């Protein structure tokens, strides 16, 4: 089962992706985009990598107590297979000792070891730097950059001055007074507001499946993973979107938890492996474009495509009998419905 989504969120006063600091000034991240008239624009942006990192954190929190994690993912650190990870070393030692594993076996054993010991490696992928078992796994979860929608005019960015105060203790009063000024450190941060868009792809059907072993040309569930573990991982990969919609998905959260309101979403669910990504909600006409897109995909593939749309759409013409359209009134109901459809299978 494959899940695609695109949506729009109103986000006020955020600093979700810092660029760099110059002295006491921290710049908000900006990237260059081309609008449909071909004009170059610089816009406040949050990277897909940042969103992916926060998604992995929520998946871990949702699965905690019912699944396994490596030491890094267990601490919510974004390292997939660092140099000092000893899980693959164990397999190599076995190979050296028993001289029984061929290269393909090493890859399969390595994958099995990583997927059974860490749910995040399974869902978010990895790249092994080990020269003998240089296996890799594409992430099953992918996010676009988070950028203001194309109708946005001049961007709302403002700089705020913050004051960090450090108390000096255990010194004479006179020295304390001299240092009074230094106890206060001013620093400057930028905050942005706007309607932002994001697109994501979550390959649920490929979570817990092998990249190195197949049956009748199709990947199979990695040995050692129980059915309920696989189902739970797939469900949590979608459920993790709910807390992210509340704005906890980037930097500077303690000082500026974003003031968010998710406003629009489209979610497509299908068993069809060729299910395409949506036309991004960045574009103002994305809803009509995506209705036409998913209608065509359903008709061409003859696979059922479940399409959840918020806000509801007007009647569309020539709908494929394989397109199942669901109107929902809010984004969270749409995600809940997606979870129901996925659980039903
Ligand atoms: Zn891990």
Image (tube, rainbow, N blue to C red):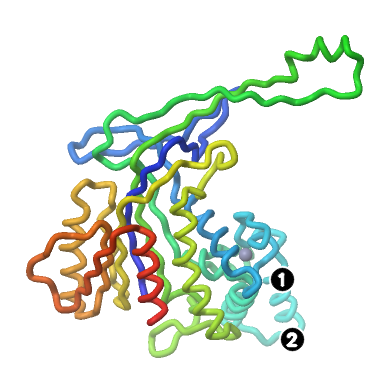
Q: Nearer the viewer, residue 332 or 60?
A: 332
293 relative position to 42: left or right: left
Looking at the rendering, the quadrant in which ligand 1 lies is bottom right
> Are there few (<14), some (14-19), or many (20+) residues within 10 Å of tag 2?
few
Q: CA distance from mark 1 to mark 2?
A: 14 Å
Residue 6: x and y in percent read 32, 56
**Where is the C terminus found, in terms of image quarters?**
bottom left
Identify which residue, 241 or 4, lies in the foreground. Answer: 241
- Residue 114 picture location, percent across and down: 62, 72
Q: Are marks 1 and 2 in contact (CB under 8 Å)?
A: no
Residue lying at 47% horizontally and 73% vertically, measured from the top left: 234
Disc sitting over residue 243 in the figure: none
Residue visible at 62% across and 77% down in the picture: 116
Residue 335 x %, y %: 38, 64
Mark nearest the camera among 1 and 2 is: 1
Q: Which mark is residue 98?
A: 2
* Residue 89: numbered disc: 1
Establish if 277 lies above or below 283.
below
**What SS does tag 1 mark?**
helix
């Amino acid at each position: 089962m494959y899940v695609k989504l695109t949506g729009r969120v109103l986000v006020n006063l955020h600093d979700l992706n810092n660029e760099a600091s110059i002295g006491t000034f921290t710049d908000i991240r900006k990237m260059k985009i081309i609008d449909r008239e071909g004009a170059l624009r610089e816009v406040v942006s949050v990277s897909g990598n940042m969103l992916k990192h926060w998604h992995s954190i929520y998946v871990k929190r949702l699965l905690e107590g019912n699944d396994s994690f490596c030491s890094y993912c267990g601490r919510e650190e974004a390292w997939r297979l660092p140099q000092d990870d000893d899980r693959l070393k164990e397999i190599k030692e076995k190979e050296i000792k028993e001289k029984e594993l061929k290269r393909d076996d090493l890859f399969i054993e390595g994958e099995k070891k990583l997927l059974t010991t860490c749910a995040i490696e399974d869902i978010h992928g990895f790249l092994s730097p080990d020269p003998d078992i240089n296996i890799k796994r594409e992430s099953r979860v992918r996010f676009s950059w988070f950028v203001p929608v194309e109708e946005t005019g001049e961007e709302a960015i403002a700089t705020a001055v913050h004051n960090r105060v450090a108390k000096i203790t255990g010194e004479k009063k006179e020295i304390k007074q001299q240092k009074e000024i230094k106890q206060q450190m001013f620093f400057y941060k930028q905050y942005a507001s706007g309607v932002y868009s994001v697109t994501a792809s979550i390959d649920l059907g490929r979570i817990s499946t092998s990249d190195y072993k197949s049956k009748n040309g199709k990947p199979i569930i990695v040995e050692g993973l129980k059915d309920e573990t696989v189902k739970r991982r797939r469900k949590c990969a979608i459920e993790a979107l709910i807390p992210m919609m509340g704005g906890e998905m980037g930097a500077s959260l303690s000082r500026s938890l974003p003031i968010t309101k998710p406003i629009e979403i489209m979610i497509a669910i299908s068993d069809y492996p060729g299910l395409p990504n949506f036309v991004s909600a960045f574009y103002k006409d994305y809803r009509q474009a995506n209705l036409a897109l998913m209608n065509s995909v359903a008709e061409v593939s003859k696979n059922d495509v479940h399409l959840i749309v918020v806000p509801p759409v007007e009647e569309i013409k020539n709908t494929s009998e394989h397109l199942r359209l669901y109107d929902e009134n809010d984004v969270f109901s749409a995600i809940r419905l997606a979870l129901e459809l996925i659980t039903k299978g």
